[in-house]
Image (tube, grey):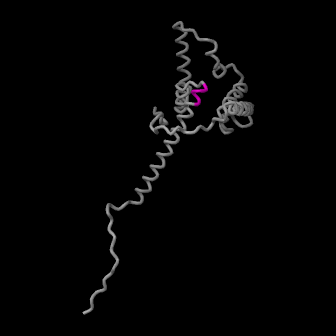
Amino acid sequence: MAKPEQNNVVELKRNGPAINPVTALNLGKMRRAQEELASANGAYRNVLKHVEAKGIDLAAAKEALSIVKSGKTNEYIAKTGRVVEYLHIFGQSIEEAQMSFDYLINGAMPSEEKARMLGLAAGMRGDGDGENPYAPGSPQHNQWQAGLNDGRRSRAVAEADDGGDEHIKSDGGDADDDVFEEDED
């Protein structure tokens, strides 16, 4: 009787549960996204420190960004106008310097002049050509574009005067500090 051949190969058995490749893939994605968020939050914190050192009122800037993001700018401006009116009724004075934003709400201002001022602000913010809200070829469109170009030149001068600090290194702080916030209305 022939003896069955013995195989010297030992079957390896897992020392734990099998790893699901889909789970491993998604956990890797999650870890990388968390690392990217931590890095972005560090960069964000450093930008906040930088702009605050340049005299920006962070609370006001964050509120303005929140209002813009909500899409309720007109409602906010109307409410603020009523608040200012009521402060006046309560005898609180409003300095002339505090009313310097009048050009944005002055209905008597020629639309081309207003378009140029809005384009100037857009250029200083770093907005692109595609942000022009006016119909192509219209006088307002052309004035907005001219203002945008003036704003870009002003921005370039400001960046040069700022020492080129546009990109600031992360301080490596905790990822939970000043986490990017999503406003929910």
Q: Quadrant of residue 154?
A: top right
Residue ID at (53%, 6%): 91
Q: Quadrant of residue 6?
A: bottom left
Q: Is residue 8 left or right of residue 120?
A: left
Q: Is residue 169 left or right of residue 161?
A: left
Q: Quadrant of residue 10?
A: bottom left
Q: Give the range drawn in magenta.
A: 50-54
Front one among 149 and 80: 149
Total count of labels: 0
Residue ID at (33%, 79%): 8
Front one among 155 and 96: 155
Q: Is residue 40 magenta?
A: no
In x, y percent, where is residue 35? 48, 46
In x, y percent, where is residue 175? 46, 39
Front one among 152 and 92: 152
Residue ID at (55%, 14%): 84
Q: Which residue lies furthest to the top in this view?
A: 91
In x, y percent, where is residue 178? 48, 34
Q: Main secondary structure of the magenta part?
A: helix
Q: Is residue 53 left or right of residue 175?
A: right
Q: Is residue 93 visible?
A: yes
In x, y percent, where is residue 81? 56, 18
In the rendered image, the vertical position of residue 162 relative to residue 39, given as above or below: above
Q: In which quarter of the image is the N terminus?
A: bottom left
Q: Can residue 182 be seen in this view?
A: no
